[in-house]
Amino acid sequence: MSTGIVTTDLRKTFPVRRWQGWRRRPAAAPVPAVDGLSLRIPPGQVTGLLGLNGAGKTTTIRILSTLLRPSGGTVSVDGLDVVEHAREVRRRINVISGGERMVYDRLTARENLWYFGQLYDVPRARLRVRIGELLDLVGLTEAARLPVERYSRGMRQRLVIARGLINDPAYLLLDEPTLGLDAPIAHQLRALIAQLAADGVGVLLTSHYLAEVEQLCRHVYLIARGSLVAQGSPAQLAGQTVRRHTVRLVLAEADPSVTAALRALAVRHDAELTVDVDDEGRPRFALRHPEDLVGAVVTAVVQQGGAVAGLTVTPPTLEDAILALADPAAVAR
Ligand SMILES: Nc1ncnc2c1ncn2[C@@H]1O[C@H](COP(=O)(O)OP(=O)(O)OP(=O)(O)O)[C@@H](O)[C@H]1O
């Protein structure tokens, strides 16, 4: 039965070794890379896993795909424990990673797929058919007999995608799958991911491209230092944080009374104000605040008889919002 991938209080610590004189010895406190994560990746939808560098995303994916043993907690895939039933779990899942070399250069596309199909215990008759289907799907039928070392980067990544689908996985773990891909290929891959989910596959996606996450994910988990800090739809996550607007103003010429009025405005609203000069030596002000203060800024300048040479307002992006949740100190910067 397809119940999804469920992690309960998942933990992974790596032993940290310190050098002491010429000897290497274990440190007192191992560093947790994953620290009590409870997630659910249901079938038939794309679930996002977001976090800053080092948050624990790749480690989590390695545990879910049976490559790493957890230090604590459990992971089950359709009710099967990943440690006790690693072989059965491996038949149901696959991984596509944008950052790692996942195919063999000396082999052709067909040979690569044959090799990985056997690793996944795909029956030979099924494998023969599946390889043809996948080469078609990723547009490599014509190049199927060339060694991969002669492929372009995009062709190679398309082969990595075919490799990830070779065992008809019920769950697909995607670790930065569009990393370094040209826009048209990334676009095709996103369409394929959406189609797989619509066909019932449970997809876990990590990506630094938030537009991709917004487009594909129904539910997103945001982690920091191996623990969950927020979850919800992309829209719900964006609404959970202090979002900041930036008003940038350039004055035609220096005017101490305008500067004083803007400083007073910033203090009144508890806004962050930076003052410098632009390339032409004109005074420039940037005011950051959760609300859009453009009206108040213009009023203050006009009341003091100042002349505005430039004015822009930058609303916060979803990226600002999500990163602010992962790293609260960033909100203050
Ligand atoms: N094999 C390892 N030995 C020791 N520490 C490790 C090992 N693998 C990962 N770590 C540490 O665990 C933490 C989580 O790393 P992980 O690669 O899972 O993060 P990530 O969220 O995937 O980051 P990125 O976005 O940079 O890929 C980091 O502090 C990392 O240094």
Image (cartoon, grey):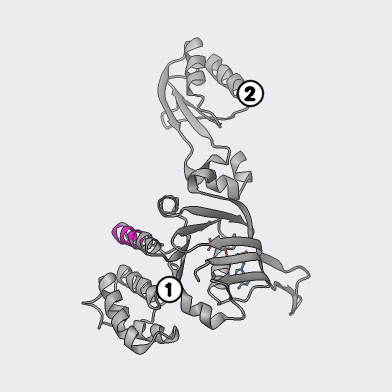
Indicate yes or no whether the magenta region holds residue 174. no
Q: Amino acid at mark 1?
A: Pro
Q: Which mark is residue 258?
A: none
Per the image, label 1 sits on a secondary structure element best described as loop
**Closer to us: 246 or 70:** 70
- On screen, residue 272 above or below 78: above
| Mark 2 CB near ligand 1 (8 Å cut) | no
Q: Quadrant of the C terminus?
A: top right
Residue at image position (37%, 59%) is: 194
Q: Which residue is mark 2?
A: 267
Q: Nearer the viewer, residue 205 or 58?
A: 205
Residue 79: x and y in percent read 57, 72
Residue topped by disc 1: 169
Name which of mark 2 and mark 1 comes first in the sequence.
1
Magenta residues, as a range? 184-191
Q: Amino acid at mark 2?
A: Val
Please state if 64 lies on the left or on the right of 171 as rendered: right
Magenta stretch, main secondary structure, is helix
Can residue 108 be spotted in the picture?
no
Q: Nearer the viewer, residue 257 or 171?
A: 171
Q: Relative to the observer, which residue lies in front, 69 or 202?
A: 202
Determine the secondary structure under disc 2.
Answer: helix
Residue drawn at point x = 59 percent, y = 63 percent = 56
Name the image quarter holding residue 58.
Answer: bottom right
